[in-house]
Amino acid sequence: MGGCEDVHVYDDITREKVDFILNKLREGNADIIGDTDGPWDIDTHDSGVKLRGEWDEVKSQMSITVTSKNFLVPCSLIWQKIDHLMGKV
């Protein structure tokens, strides 16, 4: 199981938005390893998708990397879902 090569960066991510994202992931039964300010290693328990999230408080940016996934799931589909969800934050 490999990951996806690219990193997606999201702007205007405040502390409140970070807390919201992490809480939503936990509600979806994701396992999150990392402290409040990150970085975080996230096991979504969905199609083998594991993520790495990093937050730059000064720039108000969050970067997400897909570190692992089931080989049957294309990266484009994973990013489509993540980008859609991050657009709602």
Image: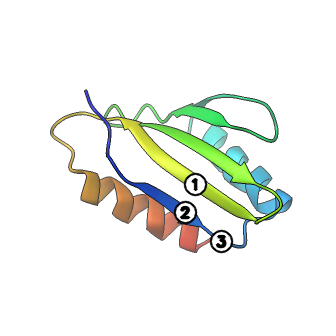
Q: Nearer the viewer, residue 63 or 43?
A: 63
Q: Which mark is residue 77?
A: none
How far apart marks 2 and 1 lie (CA) works out to: 4 Å
How far apart marks 1 and 3 lie (CA) works out to: 9 Å
Residue drawn at (65%, 71%) of the image: 11
Scheme by which the image is coloured: rainbow
Q: Which residue carries the number 3 mark? A: 11
Q: Kindly state the secondary structure of the residue where label 3 is placed.
A: loop
Q: Which residue carries the number 1 mark? A: 63
Q: Kindly state the secondary structure of the residue where label 1 is placed.
A: strand
**Which of disc 1 and disc 2 is earlier in sequence?**
2
Q: Is residue 2 above or below residue 17?
A: above
Identified by mark 2, the residue type is Val
Residue drawn at (27%, 31%) of the image: 2
Q: Kindly state the secondary structure of the residue where label 2 is placed.
A: strand
Q: Which mark is residue 9?
A: 2
Quadrant of image for the C terminus: bottom right
Q: Is residue 24 above or below residue 46?
A: below
Can residue 88 be seen here? Answer: yes
Q: Nearer the viewer, residue 41 or 30?
A: 41
Toward the front, the furthest residue is: 58
| Quarter location, residue 35 | top right
Where is residue 7 shown, x and y percent of the image? 45, 54
Residue drawn at (80%, 64%) of the image: 14
Q: Residues within 10 Å of mark 3 (few under 14, many from 20)?
A: few
Contact between labelled residues 1 and 2, with CB atoms less than 8 Å apart: yes
Can residue 30 be seen here? Answer: no
| Quarter location, residue 53 | top right
Q: Residues within 10 Å of mark 2 (few under 14, many from 20)?
A: some
Contact between labelled residues 3 and 2, with CB atoms less than 8 Å apart: yes
Where is residue 38 shown, x and y percent of the image? 73, 38
